[in-house]
Structures are given as C-alpha cells and as structure tokens.
C-alpha cells in the first residue's frame, strides 16, 4: 500500500512541480520582461528548488562519448554485449583510425567493473569507468530497475547475482580479465571467483575490491548497525513492497527506490539541507557554475532504482547478519564458498579512511580469507581523507587511487 500511496502523492504533486519549473524558467529568462521585476531572482531560485525537490529523477545516461588515450582524443561507443532480465553487460568500445593508437588500444588490459546493486544506478560509477578507459578495455554491469522487470521473469536472489557475474566473466574470458568491484559487489564477486576456482575453471588475472563489506563485523557503521539491530522479519514487514501498475514489474516484491533514497538522506540530513540552501543562494547570486555542479550531483544522487526483494533480503541476512562469508559457512546452490581456493589471481583491496558505509578493515578482510593467493600478489591501499565515494569518484580517485589501480593491473596483465 505504501508504494501505491507514494505513486498517488507523486501524481498529485506533478502539476505543481511542473508549474514551479515553468516559473523558474520565466523569471530567470533574460529575454522575458518578468525577469526584470524586483525579486525575480529569488522567485526563480525558489521555484527551481521546489521543482528539483519534487521532480522525478530517471536513470542518467552514461554520457561517455570520448576519452583521451596517449594524448589523442578517441571516440567511445556504448555497446550492449549481453542482456539478462535484471542486468545489461555493457562495453565501452574505443575507436581510432590512427595505426599507433589502434595498436595501443588492442594491447590494453581488459577490465570488468561490477557496479553495485544497492540503490543507485550503475551510472554512479561514470567517473570510475571514464578514468579506466584511458588505459583499459572496459565492461560494466548495468543493473536494471526491478520495477521495470516483468514479474513473469521470476525472482532474483543473491545466488542469481553471483551466477550473472560468473557468466559475464566466462563470456569476456577469465584468462585475460581483471575484475574491479565497488562496494556491495565485493562480496558476490569474491564468491563467484571462489566458486569458479574450486571447480577448476579459469579465474581472472586480478581482483580489485573497493570499499565493500567482506567482513561487516569489523568497524561496524550505521549501515551495519541497522542490519544487526533488527531481525530479518522487520525488513520483510517494513521495507518490502509490491510494485503497482502501470510499471512492467507490477506485482513484483521490491525494496523501493524511494525508501532507499529516504534512508540516504536520513544518514546526513543537515549536509543535504545546507547543500540545497547553498544552491538557492548561488542561483540568487548568479553563481551558475556552482549551481550547475549541484544539479549534476543530485541528478545522479536522487536517481534510484528498486531492488528485488529476494536479493535484498539475502544480502541483509548473509552479509550483514550471519556474516557467512568470513565465517566460512556460505553455500551457493549447495556449493561451499571457499576463497582459499583462489590461486593465480592477484588481489588489491582499497578502503577510505573516513568511509561511513563500509568501515575500515571490512574490505581488507579479504586478505585473511584468500590464503591461496601469494603474499607478493596481494596489496592494500587505505586512502587518507577519503569517504566512501572518494575512493572511486572525484579528484582523489583520479589523482591518488587510479594510478595505483592502473599500475597494479599492469603488473599482473601478463
């Protein structure tokens, strides 16, 4: 019922949101006489703020159309390689007509970026992907909003997530592949590679795991505490709802994106309030550069997707309540997950010093589990002054983290 009420409220507010958008345009348009009225700047600013607080945020486009490779700008084409009911495997293919550049592109290592399925769209990793494209052939998991997946496609569990990762690794070719997982997928990626290793299948050349809850018992954060404070039944009864019409996923049980977004905001409400206030002030002052930066950030931050209920509840139970991976008690479709079985794969773990989502030590715990990997093939990076997002996005990622990731992959490219 909550989902239906949310949709009803959204429909009722829509005329006012569109009116606010129109007012903002009219009162800020230099060619309109209305913009010359006293207080027009404040009226325009307040209406744009109302519009942005009430509008729907669709999945942003990747908008990766070119990248600089060895001093040359080369075009980039987004290609759908595999389409599954809940995920698209996308490749960002670089093109050039220069013989030297073509040779360099062909020689670059192949990277699979496994994006998180934890509320935001995979495009949250746009900066990660764009930066990796300088020196790598890049694939990425582009997860599909569960409300857009017809109920006839069936359930999607954490086991299914792992099966998707295994399929993608096999399709690309494990022998030439380096896997980068960011946040939530560190756990299923480690499980997928562990299962493949235990079966004797080829495994990726390297794993780069960034800010993920490999062992959520270490340095627990507010996110971890919420999961341990409430029984699984609380999550089933309070955050799981049914997709209403007219969405294709009508009838599917999900953890709705609007509830996740409310949780994101609740983690630091004062910061978001001040950000919106600064946005209003910048519009009034005519500081369009800072205002545009605010728009870009919240266009991404406010765009959320619904997660399949089965997958979400599995993650809560297995990762954050029972800690099955670090305890050595996790089985996926009857197969035990044994990270110690991984051999011949190098491993790098990355954590942010100030990460308030995956605490210090949670990702580094993979080193204690992957005893089959030689110590010489392991490394860890703690990024000073970085929060959760700073280790894979922004200036700190591009200038401090990426060079070390690039060099690590190059050392183990073979």
Image (cartoon, grey):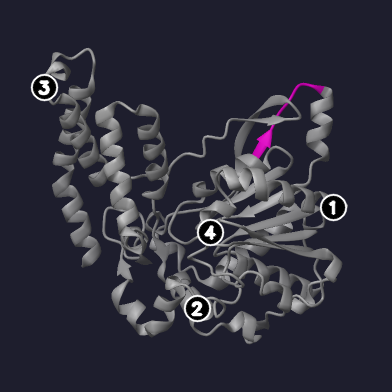
> In front of the other: label 3 or label 4?
3
Q: Is residue 281 above or below residue 405?
A: above
**Left or right position of 238 against 369:** left
**In whole angstroms, how far apart are the C-alphas of marks 2 and 3?**
55 Å
Asked if residue 59 is among those painted magenta in the image, a careful observer would answer no
Circle 3 — which element?
Answer: loop
The quadrant holding residue 277 is: top left
> In front of the other: label 1 or label 4?
1
Residue 67, horizontal then vertical, whole percent: 65, 31
Query: Residue at the spot x=32%, y=71% of the render?
Result: 239
Characterize the local packing of mark 3: few (<14), some (14-19) or many (20 or more) Cα atoms within 10 angstroms.
Answer: few
**In whole angstroms, how far apart are the C-alphas of marks 3 and 4?**
48 Å
> In front of the other: label 2 or label 4?
2
Q: Mark 2 or mark 4: name the one nearer the start of the chain.
A: 4
The residue identified by callout 2 is 320
Q: Mark 2 or mark 1: name the one nearer the start of the chain.
A: 2
The quadrant holding residue 65 is: top right
The stretch in magenta equals 92-98
Q: Is residue 47 above or below residue 121?
A: above
> In front of the other: label 2 or label 3?
3
The residue identified by callout 3 is 38
On residue 411, the disc is 1
Circle 1 — which element?
Answer: helix
The residue identified by callout 4 is 116
Q: Mark 3 or mark 4: name the one nearer the start of the chain.
A: 3
Residue 12, horizontal then vertical, whole percent: 13, 48
Characterize the local packing of mark 2: few (<14), some (14-19) or many (20 or more) Cα atoms within 10 angstroms.
Answer: many
The quadrant holding residue 170 is: bottom right
């Amino acid at each position: 019922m909550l989902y239906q009420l949310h949709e009803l409220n959204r429909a009722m507010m829509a005329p006012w949101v569109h009116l606010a958008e129109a007012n903002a345009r009219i009162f800020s348009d230099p060619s309109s006489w209305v913009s010359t009225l006293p207080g027009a700047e404040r009226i325009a600013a307040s209406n744009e703020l109302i519009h942005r607080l009430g509008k729907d945020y669709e999945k942003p486009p990747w908008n990766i159309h070119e990248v600089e490779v060895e001093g040359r700008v080369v075009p980039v084409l987004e290609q759908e390689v595999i389409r599954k009911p809940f995920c698209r495997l996308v490749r960002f293919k670089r093109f050039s007509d220069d013989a030297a550049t073509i040779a360099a592109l062909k020689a670059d290592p192949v990277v699979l970026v496994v994006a998180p399925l934890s509320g935001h769209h995979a495009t949250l990793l746009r900066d990660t992907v764009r930066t990796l494209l300088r020196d790598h052939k890049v694939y990425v998991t582009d997860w599909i909003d569960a409300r857009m997946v017809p109920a006839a496609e069936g359930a999607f569990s954490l086991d299914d997530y792992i099966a998707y990762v295994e399929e993608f690794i096999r399709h690309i070719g494990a022998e030439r592949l380096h896997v980068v997982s960011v946040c939530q997928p560190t756990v299923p990626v480690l499980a997928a590679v562990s299962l493949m290793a235990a079966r004797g299948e080829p495994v990726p050349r390297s794993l780069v795991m960034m800010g993920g809850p490999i062992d959520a018992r270490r340095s627990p954060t507010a996110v971890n505490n919420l999961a341990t404070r409430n029984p699984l039944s609380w999550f089933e009864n309070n955050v799981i709802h049914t997709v209403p019409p007219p969405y294709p996923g009508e009838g599917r049980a999900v953890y709705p994106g609007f509830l996740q977004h409310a949780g994101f905001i609740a983690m630091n409400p004062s910061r978001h309030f001040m950000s919106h206030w600064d946005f209003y002030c910048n519009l009034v002052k005519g500081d369009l550069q800072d205002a545009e930066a605010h728009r870009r950030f919240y266009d991404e931050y406010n765009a959320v997707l619904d997660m399949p209920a089965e997958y979400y509840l599995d993650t809560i139970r297995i990762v954050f309540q029972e800690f099955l991976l670090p305890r050595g008690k996790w089985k996926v479709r009857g197969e035990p997950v044994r990270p110690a079985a991984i051999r011949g794969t190098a491993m790098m773990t990355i954590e942010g010093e100030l990460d308030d989502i995956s605490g210090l030590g949670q990702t580094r715990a993979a080193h204690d589990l992957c005893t089959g990997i030689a110590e010489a093939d392991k490394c860890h990076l703690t990024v000073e002054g970085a929060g959760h997002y700073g280790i894979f996005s922004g200036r700190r990622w591009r200038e401090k983290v990426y060079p070390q990731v690039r060099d690590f992959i190059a050392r183990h490219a073979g």
